[in-house]
Image (cartoon, helix red, strand yellow):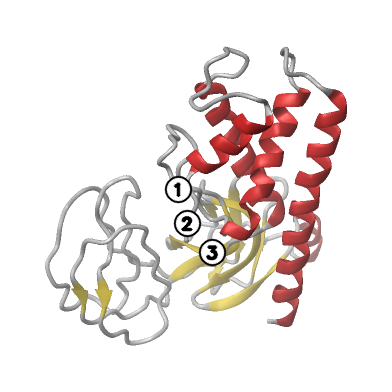
Amino acid sequence: MATQWGAIYAEVADVILESTPLSLGLLTDAQFYAMAAEVLLDFTGKSGLIKRLFNHQLSFGVQQYPQSPMLADLEGCLALQSFIYESSDFYLSNADREWQNFLNVSNPESYRQDSIPTKLVQVTPAPQVNGNQFGVVGGSQFGVIGGVQSFTDFTWTADPLTPVGFGTPYAFNGNPYVEALNPGWGVIATLVPSTNNLTMQGTALPWQVSGLTANSYIELVPDTFTPYLKYGILSRIFGGDSELRDEQKAAYCTSRYSEGIAIVAAVMCDVYQEQ
């Protein structure tokens, strides 16, 4: 069962001896939800609680590709559905002085993140093919998707804040990665994965980090770990510059919050190693 932020709101109000809604002026609703967003981003990013695949269309001769804003830490890449190794500018520059030559096109064999702008990935060699994607963004509604125009069509994307999604997938030919947050598209009858795209695997960040309300669901965090979010928020409240400041309480809450991150990170590390 998903937890709403209203439950954490009530627990925090109880700890600081306030009623709900907050009324004494020591902490406002806006301050609480701003802290909630910060803690959620921090918790999911540091713990690696949820891992996802993020796909990007490859372009002929293009080496650099942006990472998704929903990707926290990149842990691996696949190009043309094949694993590629992580490398570095130092190694590539010393191994082959022509490695950045735009005429050097082939199947990518490695990727790097250093010595380039943040949130970018550079593959080497440059791709020798163009990938194809079929994207739908917004509130459009569809009945039944009976097929795709080309065997290289790969990804459907939907705006998470509008009521669109995938409905019931009926059959797949291959092993595509499909993810949706909302219902809306009837039945997908046939879907063939592309072999010409870049796949980035890593820890995921939540979609909604602004405009949170009591009725907003806590994304990515199972009910078992939501109490640690409370301690993360309380550590900021007691450690802030307000009448609620209490260094001893802040230290305790910070310790409990860090404990939660360590537990989740340890669990995810074990699962990852076993796989």
x and y percentages locating residue 116 in the rendered image: 66, 45
- Of the two numbered discs 2 and 1 on the same chain, state the one appearing first in sequence: 2
Residue situated in front as seen by the camera: 233 or 127: 233
Q: Which residue is drawn at 87% across and 28% down?
A: 248
User: Could you tell me if residue 118 is visible in this image?
Assistant: no
* Secondary structure of the residue carrying numbered label 3: strand
Residue situated in front as seen by the camera: 35 or 95: 35
Q: In this view, does 9 lie above or below 26?
A: below
Mark seen at residue 245: none
Look at the numbered discs 2 and 1 and tell me whether their residues touch, using CB distance below 8 Å.
Answer: yes
Q: Residue at x 17, y 52 (%)?
A: 140
> Which residue is identified by label 3?
52
* Secondary structure of the residue carrying numbered label 1: loop
CA gap between label 2 and label 1 equals 7 Å
Of the 4 image quadrants, the one containing the C terminus is bottom right
Q: Is residue 230 above or below residue 34?
A: below
* Secondary structure of the residue carrying numbered label 2: loop
Three-letter code, disc 2: Ala
Say few, some or many: other residues with alpha carbon within 10 Å of mark 1 (under 14 / 14 to 19 / 20 or more). some
Mark seen at residue 217: 1
> Which residue is identified by label 2?
2
Q: Residue at x 70, y 55 (%)?
A: 47
